[in-house]
Amino acid sequence: MDNNLPVVCRACNRTVKMDQVKFDETRRSYVCITCFNSTHKTMPEIRRTNPSSLKTEAENLKSVKDSMVKYSCLGCKYHFSRKKDKQVASCPYCGSKKLQTLGDTANQILEDADKYNF
Ligand SMILES: [Zn+2]
Ligand SMILES: [Zn+2]
């Protein structure tokens, strides 16, 4: 008995070897292993990535704000902010070295603006 006789798959009509076919109960006929697996395979579970590990946009903005220092140029009244670890020697607008470091809170700046009304 030759086990390698060519058999036509009932599902895809491919001719496959006898040892490459399986009896499919749902089709009640012999199909190739590929077709058999595609019929009987279980759907793999789709894992969703957990978004909780990602920082929210608000948290990111806060951390950036915290590391910024506000400067005010006494020469041209230009206001700008730089990162805390970055040394600022002169005004980026007029090049003046007369720089004033402003308070961290926005309230302080508003207060100053009210007082001097510049
Ligand atoms: Zn097939
Ligand atoms: Zn300036």
Image (cartoon, grey):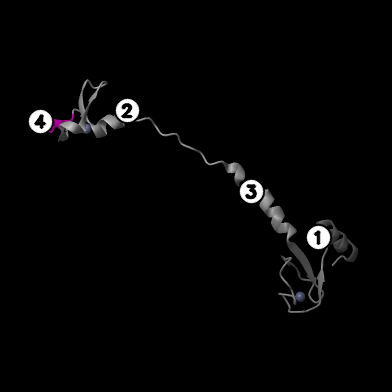
Q: Is residue 33 left or right of residue 107?
A: left
* 10 Å crowding of disc 4: few (<14), some (14-19), many (20+): few
- In the rendering, which numbered label is found on residue 104? 1
Q: Nearer the viewer, mark 3 or mark 4?
A: 4
Evaluate if marks 2 and 4 touch, with contact meaning CB atoms under 8 Å apart. Answer: no
Q: Is residue 38 left or right of residue 66?
A: left
Evaluate if marks 3 and 4 touch, with contact meaning CB atoms under 8 Å apart. Answer: no
Q: Is mark 4 within 8 Å of ligand 1?
A: no
Nearer-N-terminus badge (2/3): 2
Residue 27 drawn at (x, y percent): 24, 22
Q: Is residue 26 left or right of residue 14?
A: right
Q: Nearer the viewer, mark 2 or mark 3?
A: 2
- In space, the residues marked 3 and 4 are separated at their CA atoms by 65 Å
- In space, the residues marked 4 and 1 are separated at their CA atoms by 88 Å
Picture residue at 61% right of the left edge, 45% below the top = 53
Nearer-N-terminus badge (2/4): 4
In terms of image quadrants, where is residue 18?
Answer: top left
Q: Is residue 29 visible?
A: yes
- Nearer the observer, 91 or 2: 2
Q: Nearer the viewer, mark 2 or mark 1?
A: 2
- In space, the residues marked 1 and 3 are separated at their CA atoms by 24 Å
Picture residue at 74% right of the left edge, 58% below the top = 66
Query: Residue lying farthest left?
Result: 1
Q: Nearer the viewer, mark 4 or mark 1?
A: 4
Picture residue at 82% right of the left edge, 71% below the top = 100
Element class at badge 1: loop
Q: Is residue 26 above or below residue 32?
A: above
Element class at badge 2: helix
Report the predominant secondary structure element of the magenta stretch.
Answer: loop
- In the rendering, which numbered label is found on residue 40? 2
The residue range painted magenta reads: 2-9
Tell me the residue that label 3 is attached to.
Answer: 55
